[in-house]
Image (spheres, grey):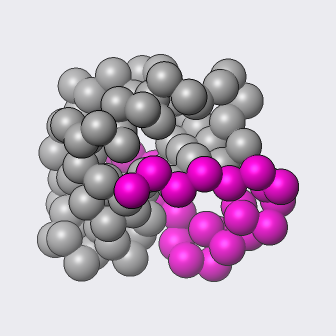
Amino acid sequence: MLHILTKALNSDAAHQMQQAVGEEDIVVLTEEGVQAALKTHWEGWQAYQSRIYLLAEDVAAWGLNAAVTANGLPTVDMNGFVTLTEHHSQIVTWY
């Protein structure tokens, strides 16, 4: 399953998502969710490790490129995001 989080990490949506993510699921942080680049202590970084991505276009829009680079955080561009949606029959967007 693909989980798309559009809200900040302290939102109800983020908490609900964290409870729902399975061991094989992928997480993409978009919109406000990319603020996770500033919160490297967020448990999602440890819980999902190689299965979590920040949407590169939103990272740039929020001015977080330096934080992403400094912390070595994984990103996915819009083309990669579309590919992820094509490869997952189940997608949940958390608003």
Q: Specify whether residue 47 is in view.
A: yes
At x 76%, y 51%, the residue is: 90
Task: Name the quadrant containing residue 16.
Answer: top left
Q: Residue at x 24, y 49 (%)?
A: 8
| Residue 64 screen position, x and y as percent | 20, 63
Q: Tell me if residue 69 can be seen.
A: no
| Of residues 35 and 6, the one drawn nearer to the viewer in this rendering | 6
Apparent side of residue 72 relative to residue 62 in the rendered image (left or right): right
Position of 80 relative to 33 (above/below): below
Quarter occupied by residue 9 = top left
Q: In this view, does 79 lie to the left or right of 37?
A: right
Left or right side of 95 for 79: right
Task: Check the picture and name the quadrant holding the C terminus.
Answer: bottom left
Read off the magenta span.
Answer: 71-95
Q: Position of residue 3 (x, y in %)?
A: 57, 47
Q: Which of 16 and 59 is in front in this view?
A: 16
* Residue 36, above or below 81: above
Answer with the quarter of the image where residue 56 lies. bottom left
Query: Which x, y percent locates residue 88?
Result: 79, 54
Please name whichever residue, 29 or 89, is drawn nearer the observer in this view of the structure: 89
Q: Which residue is drawn at 72% across and 43% down?
A: 1
Q: Does the magenta stretch include residue 88?
A: yes
Residue 52 sits above or below residue 56 on the image: above
Whether residue 32 sits left or right of residue 52 in the image: it is left
Q: Where is residue 44 in the image (x, y as percent from the top left)?
A: 39, 29
